[in-house]
Amino acid sequence: MQIPKPSDAAKALFTSSMPDDPRVVVKPMFGNLGAFVNGNMFAGLFGDRIGVKVLDEAARAELEATEGAGPFGPEGRPMGGYVSVPEAWDRERLAEWVERAFDDVAMLPPKAQKAAKPKR
């Protein structure tokens, strides 16, 4: 599977849409970007598509029904619970949904750290 690379413009839009909160951690993931709170991903960049984790089923249905929204992640293997926002959205509209995703995911328990692999 070929993983698409994001454009510089998509990276800039993604990072500029993050909430102004010290708990937000944006880091590279497979050549793309992921945004995390307490170790849990709440938004991601896959190629030039931005996806948000939507925990509330009614909100997810609302976003999925929006023209231009769709599955997030590799074709045929989308990430569960994530929805790609319409590419036509401006930064403000995008930031609203990123903030919603952040607020929801921030309420989840912190993700447990993986145990270090033993040295051989």
Image (cartoon, rainbow, N blue to C red):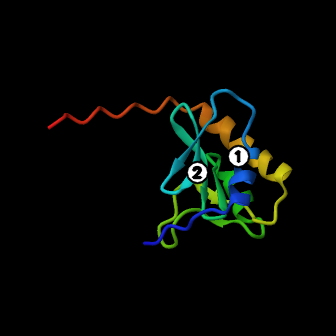
Q: Residue furthest top?
A: 22
Q: Which mark is residue 23?
A: none
Q: Position of residue 101 (x, y in %)?
A: 67, 43
Q: Report which residue position mark 1 lands on.
A: 15
The disc, 2 or 1, on the residue closer to the chain's N-terminal end is 1
Rate crowding at label 1 as few (under 14), some (14 to 19) or many (20 or more) other CA atoms within 10 Å: some
Q: Report which residue position mark 2 lands on.
A: 33
Q: Mark 2 near mark 1, Cβ–Cβ under 8 Å?
A: yes
Residue 69 falls left or right of residue 119: right
Question: In percent of the image, x 67 and y 63: which residue is there?
Answer: 7
Viewer-proximal residue, 87 or 66? 87
Question: In percent of the image, x 47 and y 72: which residue is there?
Answer: 2
Which amino acid type is shown beneath numbered disc 2? Leu
Question: In percent of the image, x 75 and y 53: which residue is there?
Answer: 13
Tell me the distance, in whole angstroms, between the alpha carbons under discs 2 and 1: 9 Å
Rate crowding at label 2 as few (under 14), some (14 to 19) or many (20 or more) other CA atoms within 10 Å: many
The quadrant where residue 10 appears: bottom right
Q: Position of residue 27 (x, y in %)?
A: 56, 43
Which amino acid type is shown beneath numbered disc 1? Thr
The quadrant where residue 72 appears: bottom right
Question: In percent of the image, x 85 and y 57: which residue is there?
Answer: 90
Q: Position of residue 11 (x, y in %)?
A: 68, 54
Give the structural element (helix, strand or loop) at label 2. strand
Instruction: Give above or below for 93 relative to 113.
Output: below
Viewer-proximal residue, 22 or 73? 22
